[in-house]
Amino acid sequence: FRDRQLFAACKDMLHQPKDTRWRTLLNHVLNESSISQRPRKGCTSNLPGTTPVCRKQKVMLLHFSKASGSAVCRLAQAAGCTTWASDGNCGRRQREYADGPWWIPVSHAQSAWERSRFAYPDAIARMGSGRSNCSERLARAPQFHAVESTLPGGVPCPGFFTLAMLRPPLERMVSHSFELARWGLVRPRKQGFCSNYSHMRRLAPAVYDNYYHRVLLGERVLGLPPGAITSAHLAEAKRVLSSLQLVLLSNDASTPATLQRATGIANFTACRDTTRPAPCAMSDEDSERARRDNAHDLALYAYAERLAAQHVAKWGAGMG
């Protein structure tokens, strides 16, 4: 069975960009069901005398793509938290979890690799099919795992220490444009990416239409068509976000110290990717449309700023 899996992986690699093929082979060679305790190179662990929260309580990171979730994952690994062995972002992609990134509808994927790595079902009813529920996750997940697709059922799982990082919505969107292009998901390439908002919105509607709402509110909201997010969803998203134990802003100067006090995981800046892509800007017309299309995400981020300030003050005062 493992040989057939490896053969299928090698066959599928032919449809991938050359610079990503080795990643797929590695993921299939490694035992996907194992749990890793090995720290990643290049990141420092928790400070002496501190105990990571994962040693006392399992942690679930709600990983908003391009908002430093990968850095938090690497720091958790470096601090000694167990994570899924072969998934670099701490989110397990297999069907029973389906926690990897959901960036494009499955009908937009052009290979089995794209379907398995980045796509979500076109039918909302199929999105939650087979995903582990909260009690199963609490029993089976490692000490630290991330959800990058959408929060299962749109409800934070009890029993976990839950946290999320956010960054300004339009800034995050432009960064996500580069990420889609990096993985070869922008077609045709001559369309450009961050300079062609209309094309990117058609290609990856969940990414370009109130993305924070879609990740927070679960399968029933992630698959809604563009323009379907309402003020009622905004009120619901605020309630879900406020129920997390820790909400921080990835670009805020107070985040590293607060993350350390709240989770025992230190040196946030050590694991962040400091490389920056070439400047890229949407036209004034596209920028205005993006602000209009993502008005609910902009309002939710303003709420997250206030919430994060409260959490910074709480943990700064030494409260748990």
Image: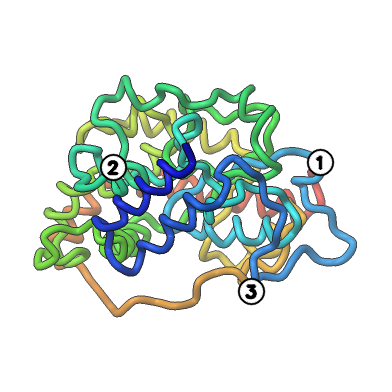
The x, y position of residue 183, in whole percent, is 31, 61
Residue annotated with mark 2: 206
Q: Residue 162 falls in which quadrant of the image?
A: top right
The x, y position of residue 20, in whole percent, is 36, 63
Q: Are marks 3 and 1 in contact (CB under 8 Å)?
A: no
Compared to residue 172, the image places residue 100 above or below, namely: above
Q: Amino acid at mark 2?
A: Ala
Q: Amino acid at mark 1?
A: Lys
Crowding around mark 1 (Cα neighbors within 10 Å: few <14, some 14 to 19, many 20+) is few
SS class, disc 3: loop
Q: Is residue 171 visible?
A: no
The x, y position of residue 270, in whole percent, is 63, 73
> Horizontally, is 2 left or right of 248 in the view?
left
> Horizontally, is 247 left or right of 143 in the view?
left
Mark-to-mark CA distance, 3 and 2: 32 Å
Q: Amino acid at mark 3?
A: Gly
Nearer the N terminus, badge 3 or badge 2? 3
**Which residue appears farthest toward the right when viewing the image?**
49
**Residue at image x 42%, y 42%?**
5
Residue annotated with mark 3: 42
Nearer the N terminus, badge 1 or badge 2? 1
Mark-to-mark CA distance, 3 and 1: 25 Å
Compared to residue 190, the image places residue 210 above or below, namely: above
SS class, disc 1: loop
> Horizontally, is 68 left or right of 140 in the view?
left
Crowding around mark 3 (Cα neighbors within 10 Å: few <14, some 14 to 19, many 20+) is few
Q: Is residue 17 visible?
A: yes
Q: Which mark is residue 56?
A: 1
**Residue at image x 22%, y 65%?**
194
